Image (spheres, rainbow, N blue to C red):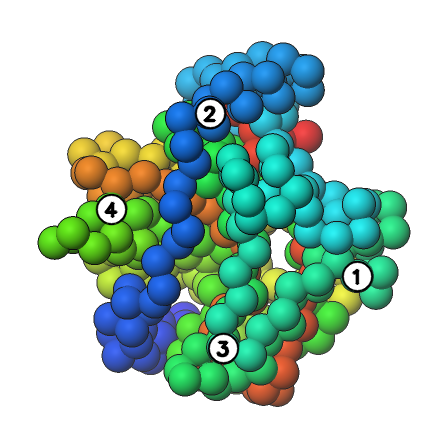
Amino acid sequence: MRVVLERLGRTVEKGRNQIHRAKWLRQTKKSMLVATTAVGLFAFAIFGGCAGYTAKTNGGGPGSLLWSADMETGDLSQWFFPMTGPVGNFGGDIENSGTANAVASTDFARSGAYSAKLTITTPDTPTSGARLFRWAEAQTYPQLYYSVWYYFPQSYTPSLFWNVLQWKSKHVVSGTVVSDPFFSLEVGALPNGEMYFYLGDDHLNTTFQQPAQSLMPVPVGRWFNVQAFYKCDGSGAGEVTIWQDGTQLWDIQNVDTRYADGDCAWSVNNYSSGLTPATSTIYIDDAAICSGGRCR
């Protein structure tokens, strides 16, 4: 299995090299939050029971909830909080590109009746992506914990990359705003169809694989949790930690996790240049961002 994973890693890296520039030149994000973002988050922290930002606690205790989305509104409006859509002081966004759609659905739900249903058809000049973004929290607190529950109804096989979670950084280059991925959680597949996660450092165009002897498969037909700690830093002191169902997969330290003159944004995605079957759907529920410790 180690040989298979190494070959898959080389194939993925080669493919990512081919599409890396195209990914970086995708449409830029809408303008970031205005100065009232901090006020809105402060009010949310007071009335939502948030104790404010504290340093990393190695995930030893539950953190203070800053934001969450359970889709029980019957739509995806929670992703825009403190607004309910892309107007005014909205702290997140829904972005579809290529052939993609993101909606609230009652097909499957981890809690309540609704989850977010992300569907894409690949390829589409050359990628398709359904992406649910949050940036308000990451622009206010430099290090946070992120949590989301996934449901994969079946197995899919990516031809190059399949991005289901990422952090991006926006900055200005020659007067033009550019938004690029820095770290992404990607899905690979073994020859037998079993799926697994690997971590992409998109800024350096490299990947981090799981050890073959302890490879954790991506479950099919049940809800599972992914949590992350992300220290947003452009001086080489950044950190990325990923857990799958409570098991730590990576703790990458002393890396750039944003541009030195940039910001950070987080998104949960169904985003690929090619999957088999070509039309794929995944579901996400109970997304959360916390400070001071891992989300409950």
Spatial CA span between label 3 and label 4: 24 Å
Label 2: which secondary element: loop
Mark 3 or mark 1: name the one nearer the start of the chain: 3
| Amino acid bearing label 2 | Thr
Residue 74: percent from the left, percent from the top? 81, 51
Q: Is residue 27 visible?
A: yes
Mark 2 or mark 4: name the one nearer the start of the chain: 2
Mark 1 or mark 2: name the one nearer the start of the chain: 2
Q: Nearer the viewer, residue 13 or 258?
A: 258
| Amino acid bearing label 3 | Gly
Mark 1 or mark 4: name the one nearer the start of the chain: 1
**Which residue matches tag 2?**
36
Is 141 above or below relative to 147? above
Q: Quick check: marks 2 and 4 in contact, CB under 8 Å?
A: no
Label 4: which secondary element: strand
| Amino acid bearing label 4 | His
Spatial CA span between label 2 and label 4: 20 Å
Is 252 above or below relative to 116? above
Residue at image location 55% in from the left, 23% down from the top? 40
Label 2 neighbour load within 10 Å: few <14, some 14-19, many 20+: few
**Which residue matches tag 1?**
105
Direction front: furthest residue: 88
Quadrant of the image containing the C terminus? top right
| Amino acid bearing label 1 | Ser
Q: Which numbered circle lies on residue 171? A: 4
Mark 3 or mark 2: name the one nearer the start of the chain: 2
Q: Nearer the viewer, residue 24 or 243?
A: 24
